[in-house]
Image (spheres, rainbow, N blue to C red):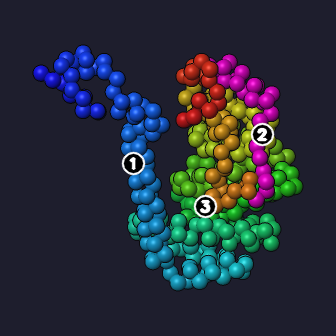
């Protein structure tokens, strides 16, 4: 009974000859850097990305359709630099977000949140560049996070502008010039019920080493309850001052109050530091592009942290020739 090769179509009298033959089609496929399976995975990835883009567009369209004309026109005025309009913008934004959130119409709530997020944050930032901290301080005072049950829904936009202010101030004028109220405000969002608010607050890390507000002490205090928030903040502490950040991480990893799993979670931020990927927070803003900022390891710090990780046994799940990038979670 003849046996046919599925790849090239040649027939053989025995299975042994079929298995041993030098198939040109299989060789061609093996030389191709993109196998059929890789191509299949790429097609799935492209389809998922297209679906995500459609979902984002549909979400923002829903938000724009549901938003009031008052919200839209106030945004236009704030975008022109009108500080009074900016306060009215946040008030109206908060009001409309609250309306749909309380009605449990979460699709519309998210639509409005994201449709106005970037332009509102840009408007606040432009005014803050002109007016200084006093402008943002009034917003922080008006929309504090009192508790998880009393959290302004417009907070992410304010945090975004405050975060940009904190980063710029640190790099231009030094850590001591950062207003304490700015750090207190950002630091209050650890454990926020809103993932977006919690993410935007991680620029808190740029305050490490402040003479009148201890970021390190606060992170140490909340590390057992909010390890993932602390992990996010740690990334920014390294970008701000890797020596102070290493001191803090050393304390967090060598103490006995944090369990092994959470200590590994905290240490894993080194994978992101090592990859030197652009910071994603504050959203819609790139510190490297605006301020020509680049992070470079002090090799003594890198070596020191590697020793700490090995001394604490946090490297056991990793390959023998592990690097920080292997710690990604």
Under circle 3, the secondary element is helix
The residue closer to the viewer here, 36 or 246, is: 36
- The label nearer to you, 2 versus 1, is 1
Mark 3: give few (<14), some (14-19) or many (20+) Cα within 10 Å: many
Q: In which quarter of the image is residue 258?
A: top right
Judge whether residue 299 is colored magenta: yes
Mark 1: give few (<14), some (14-19) or many (20+) Cα within 10 Å: few
Judge whether residue 53 is colored magenta: no
Q: Residue at 46% across / 72% down in the picture?
A: 61
The N terminus, quarter of image: top left
Q: Where is residue 57 in the image (x, y as percent from the top left)?
A: 46, 67
Separation of marks 3 and 1 at Cα, in angstroms: 32 Å
Q: Where is residue 73 in the image (x, y as percent from the top left)?
A: 59, 83
Q: Give the range drawn in magenta.
A: 290-313
Is residue 200 something one can see in this rendering?
yes
Task: Report the magenta stretch's main SS.
Answer: helix
Q: Where is residue 240 in the image (x, y as percent from the top left)?
A: 77, 45
Q: In this view, does 208 lie to the left or right of 321?
A: right
Residue 44 tag number: 1
State the residue position of label 3: 156
State the residue position of label 2: 296
Separation of marks 2 and 1 at Cα, in angstroms: 36 Å
């Amino acid at each position: 009974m003849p046996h046919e090769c599925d790849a090239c179509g040649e027939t053989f009298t025995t299975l042994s000859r079929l298995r041993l033959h030098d198939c040109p089609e299989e060789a061609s496929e093996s030389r191709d850097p993109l196998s059929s399976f890789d191509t299949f995975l790429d097609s799935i990835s492209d389809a998922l990305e297209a679906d995500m883009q459609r979902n984002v567009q549909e979400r923002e369209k829903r938000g724009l359709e549901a938003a009031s004309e008052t919200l839209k026109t106030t945004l236009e005025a704030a975008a022109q630099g009108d500080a009074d309009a900016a306060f009215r913008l946040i008030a109206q934004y908060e009001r409309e977000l609250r309306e749909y959130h309380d009605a449990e119409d979460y699709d519309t709530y998210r639509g409005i949140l994201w449709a106005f997020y970037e332009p509102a944050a840009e408007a606040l930032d432009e005014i803050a560049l002109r007016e200084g901290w006093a402008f943002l301080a009034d917003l922080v005072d008006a929309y504090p996070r009192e508790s998880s049950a009393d959290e302004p829904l417009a907070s992410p936009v304010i945090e975004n502008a405050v975060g940009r202010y904190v980063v710029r101030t640190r790099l231009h004028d030094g850590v001591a010039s950062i207003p304490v109220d700015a750090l207190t405000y950002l630091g209050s969002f650890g454990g926020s019920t809103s993932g977006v608010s919690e993410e935007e607050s991680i620029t808190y890390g740029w305050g490490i080493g402040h003479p009148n507000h201890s970021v390190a002490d606060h992170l140490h205090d909340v590390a057992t309850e909010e390890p993932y928030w602390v992990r996010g903040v740690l990334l920014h502490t390294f970008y701000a001052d890797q020596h102070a950040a290493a001191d803090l991480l050393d304390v967090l990893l060598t103490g006995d109050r944090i369990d092994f799993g959470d200590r590994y979670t905290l240490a894993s931020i080194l994978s992101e530091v090592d990859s030197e990927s652009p910071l994603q927070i504050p959203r819609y803003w790139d510190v490297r592009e605006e301020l020509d900022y680049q992070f470079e390891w002090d090799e003594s710090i890198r070596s020191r942290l590697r020793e700490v990780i090995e001394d604490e046994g946090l490297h056991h799940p990793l390959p023998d020739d592990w690097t920080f990038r292997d710690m990604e979670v």
